[in-house]
Image (cartoon, rainbow, N blue to C red):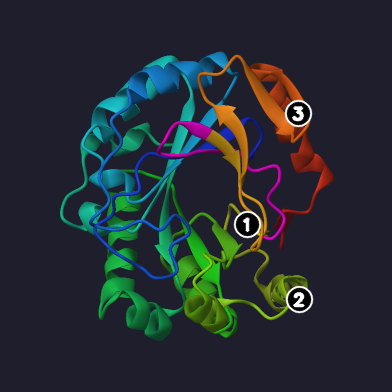
Amino acid sequence: MARHFSTHRMVCWRLSRHCNRACPFCLSTSGPRVGHPEHDPFMMANRLLDLKVEKISYSGGEPFEYPLFPALVEHVRGLGMLQLVTTNGDRLATGIPEWIRAFEYVKLSFYGSRSLHDRLMGEGNYDQQLSLAEKLITAHRVTVGANYMLSAESVQHVPAFIADMAAGGFNDVLFQTYIYNRRRHVDRRFALKDTRQAIAELRESLSVHADRLPGGMKVHDYSRRDWFIVLDDSGRLILPTSAIEQDFVMGRVTDDTLRVTPDVCIKAPAALETIWERRYATEAIVDLV
């Protein structure tokens, strides 16, 4: 399968906020006690195709906890849209399904190098992720990337982490700035003091690692997200905004018209295209090397 790592005409679909974990820094306030949505995901996938979506990036919650996920992935494959998934890896560590090959690539989540990641996710989880990546790459021929949360502490762990990713055969790394979840005690612990400065320093420190990952390294600055389209678990298309503002709701995915600004509402396909075009007018996602 050809690999596309662009973000144009892509929607991030938070299938469900149900997750086997309850990480305090989760961007979607997911957890084990959150139930799955009751809407028809197959109808919603058809609607995304009508809206000219070319790629779906599944997140959550934990996508592999969603009961209809296997059938949905096969349905979307039949529609011809590309698919990628971000996962904590826990369910895959117990068994990898054959339909995993339907994904353009699989993203595994990390929160630091070994010591910091294990402190947050449990002893041995870092090595579990590396072992899972090896199985996906060698036994299932799946392209594997990493999502790495940039927090006040994890920034200094990046060089050691990149060495492990290169040795483990990872294709790429997407660094993601910490997302404020309005829980002040958590935000103070994880938030970067100066996001732009941290990104600048990261680019400089990674310059010597330019050739270590074939897919490269990017950073997603979540303080600048007005182009990033999310389909949430209630069926709304939203634009996540800043730490202190509420997310901007474009409308429901089934609406004929959607908002692109508070005062402007246009036909749904044109609305999504308008937002996607913002990708090229912002530095929300930056190539580091």
Compared with 135, 36 (above or below) is above
Prevailing secondary structure class for the magenta stretch in the rendered image: loop
Compared with 92, 13 (above or below) is above
Element marked by disc 3? helix
Viewer-proximal residue among 34 and 42: 34
Cβ atoms at labels 3 and 1 below 8 Å apart: no
Amino acid at pointer 2: Glu
> Which residue is the site of mark 1?
216
Q: Residues within 10 Å of mark 3 (few under 14, many from 20)?
A: some
- Between the residue at mark 2 and the residue at mark 3, the CA separation in whole angstroms equals 33 Å
Q: Residue at x 47, y 67 (%)?
A: 165
> Which residue is the site of mark 3?
274
- Between the residue at mark 3 and the residue at mark 1, the CA separation in whole angstroms equals 27 Å
Q: Which residues are magenta?
A: 223-236
- Between the residue at mark 2 and the residue at mark 1, the CA separation in whole angstroms equals 15 Å
Element marked by disc 1? loop
Look at the image and tell me whether residue 275 can be seen. Answer: yes
* Residue 262 percent location from the top left of the image: 74, 36
* Residue 198 percent location from the top left of the image: 71, 76
* Residue 59 percent location from the top left of the image: 42, 46
Q: In the visual, does 251 lie left or right of 130?
A: right
Q: Which mark is residue 204?
A: 2
Q: Residue at x 75, y 41 (%)?
A: 279
